[in-house]
Image (spheres, rainbow, N blue to C red):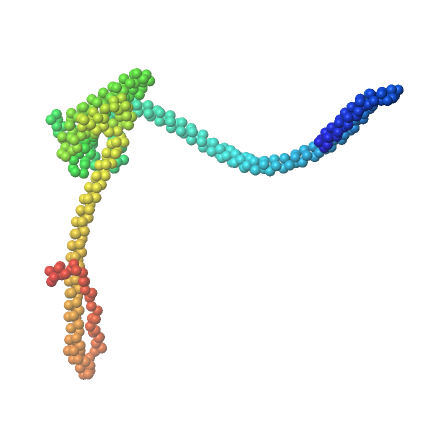
């Protein structure tokens, strides 16, 4: 409709322009031919312009009204279409929102139910952490005593032995001792090896400097105490090497194990002195943390298992041979008994035949003479035979027993 209005306005504008041009050109001709007649062109132009404006306004208002009606209908249709599309788009979202609301409600109810248990568990956890902290502090204080450190190290050693399954093959200092030039030496632990030798383990490690380091916060002071810890470990390595435990037991490995009861004790010492392990090995001292000692004891336990399997296999072989011999003797006795039963059965049948052929005819004559008593019972021969034992193993013993 807007395009039609533009076209109408353009046509009217062209007509007005053309009419004005004609009217402007006409007076000159009129003046030449009829000078006495004058035409009021301005009035005509004004009238035409007003008529055109009125027509244009009327057409514009009609077009605008029609355009508004069409636009309103189009907007209504678009609005309804948009509402339907929006409803179709939002329906899955609404369903999911409902499901989410339901899930949130369930979670909230579950949270309310578990809130009390969680608070109780949290309270218990805090108490356990506090208790652990107090026990750790107590342990740190107790380890300042050399005797307490020794007992703790021995306890750690016993736990590792139990975990490795080597309790029956390990002897502590009260059970093992060795004579040396300087007197009797009692190592903390001796581990019996499958070949009859002993592996010596020492668990007395100096920890005073390391424990002091743990209480300091100044990095320089901590580094100084750590160096003191390294020197104490090196001094203990030298003392163990000088004792030469490996020379005091027959067939013992030519080294001694120095047990450090904590992983961090050895790790921090090696961090401060990278050559500590190599230096100890040159002195025939193996520094073992709990994990490495566990691996060593598990290896020895595997060797004991292999040795015991070999010994048990030998014992099983001996017992098998003895069982074979005894079963052979029993079978020989069974064969001999069978042969005796066969001979007895044969003798019984011969006796039955003799009774039937010699004794019974005489007894029947007593019946004819009228002096017989009750009827004599019938005596039948034994027809069942014993089963022969046909084992090849009985051929030798059977011949010998016969």
State the residue at coordinates (19%, 79%): 372
Left or right: residue 45 compared with residue 183 = right
Rendering coords of residue 196 (x, y %): 16, 37
Q: Does residue 163 appear in this view? A: yes
Pick the quarter of the image with the N terminus: top right
Q: Does residue 57 appear in this view? A: no
Residue 159 found in image quarter = top left
Which residue extends farthest bottom? 369
Pick the quarter of the image with the C terminus: bottom left
Residue 176 found in image quarter = top left
Q: 304 above or below 201?
A: below
Which residue extends farthest right? 36
49 and 397: which is toward the camera: 49
Q: 252 above or below 327?
A: above
State the residue at coordinates (59%, 35%): 90
Rendering coords of residue 307 (x, y %): 19, 41
338 and 391: which is toward the camera: 391
Rendering coords of residue 86 (x, y %): 61, 35
Residue 57 found in image quarter = top right
State the residue at coordinates (28%, 27%): 262
State the residue at coordinates (81%, 25%): 48
Total numbered labels: 0
Rendering coords of residue 213 (x, y %): 29, 19
């Amino acid at each position: 409709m807007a395009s039609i209005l533009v076209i109408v306005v353009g046509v009217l504008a062209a007509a007005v322009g053309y009419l004005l041009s004609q009217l402007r050109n006409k007076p000159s001709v009129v003046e030449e031919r009829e000078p006495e007649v004058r035409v009021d062109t301005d009035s005509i132009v004004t009238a035409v312009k007003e008529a055109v404006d009125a027509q244009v306004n009327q057409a514009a208002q009609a077009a605008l009204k029609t355009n508004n009606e069409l636009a309103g209908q189009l907007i209504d249709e678009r609005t309804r279409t948009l509402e339907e599309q929006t409803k179709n788009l939002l329906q899955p979202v609404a369903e999911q929102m409902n499901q989410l609301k339901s899930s949130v409600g369930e979670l909230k109810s579950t949270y309310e139910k578990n809130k009390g248990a969680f608070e109780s568990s949290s309270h218990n956890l805090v108490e356990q952490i506090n208790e652990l902290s107090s026990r750790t502090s107590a342990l740190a204080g107790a380890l300042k005593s050399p005797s307490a450190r020794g007992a703790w190290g021995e306890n750690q050693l016993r736990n590792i032995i139990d975990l490795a399954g080597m309790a029956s093959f390990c002897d502590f200092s009260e059970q093992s001792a060795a004579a040396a030039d300087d007197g009797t030496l009692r190592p903390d632990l001796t581990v019996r090896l499958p070949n009859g030798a002993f592996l010596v383990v020492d668990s007395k490690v100096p920890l005073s400097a390391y424990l002091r380091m743990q209480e300091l916060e100044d990095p320089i002071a901590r580094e100084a105490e750590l160096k003191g810890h390294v020197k104490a470990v090196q001094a203990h390595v030298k003392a163990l090497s000088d004792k030469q435990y490996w020379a005091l037991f027959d067939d013992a490995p030519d080294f001694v194990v120095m047990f450090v009861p904590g992983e961090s004790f050895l790790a921090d010492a090696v961090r401060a002195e990278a050559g500590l392990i190599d230096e100890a090995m040159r002195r025939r001292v193996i520094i073992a943390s709990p994990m490495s000692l566990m691996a060593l004891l598990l290896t020895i336990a595997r060797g004991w298992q292999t040795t015991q399997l070999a010994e048990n296999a030998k014992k099983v072989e001996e017992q098998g041979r003895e069982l074979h011999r005894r079963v052979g003797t029993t079978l020989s006795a069974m064969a001999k008994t069978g042969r005796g039963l066969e001979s007895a059965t044969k003798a019984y049948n011969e006796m039955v035949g003799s009774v039937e052929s010699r004794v019974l005819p005489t007894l029947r004559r007593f019946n004819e003479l009228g002096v017989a008593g009750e009827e004599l019972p019938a005596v039948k021969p034994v027809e069942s035979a014993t089963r022969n034992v046909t084992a090849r193993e009985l051929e030798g013993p059977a011949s010998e027993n016969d």
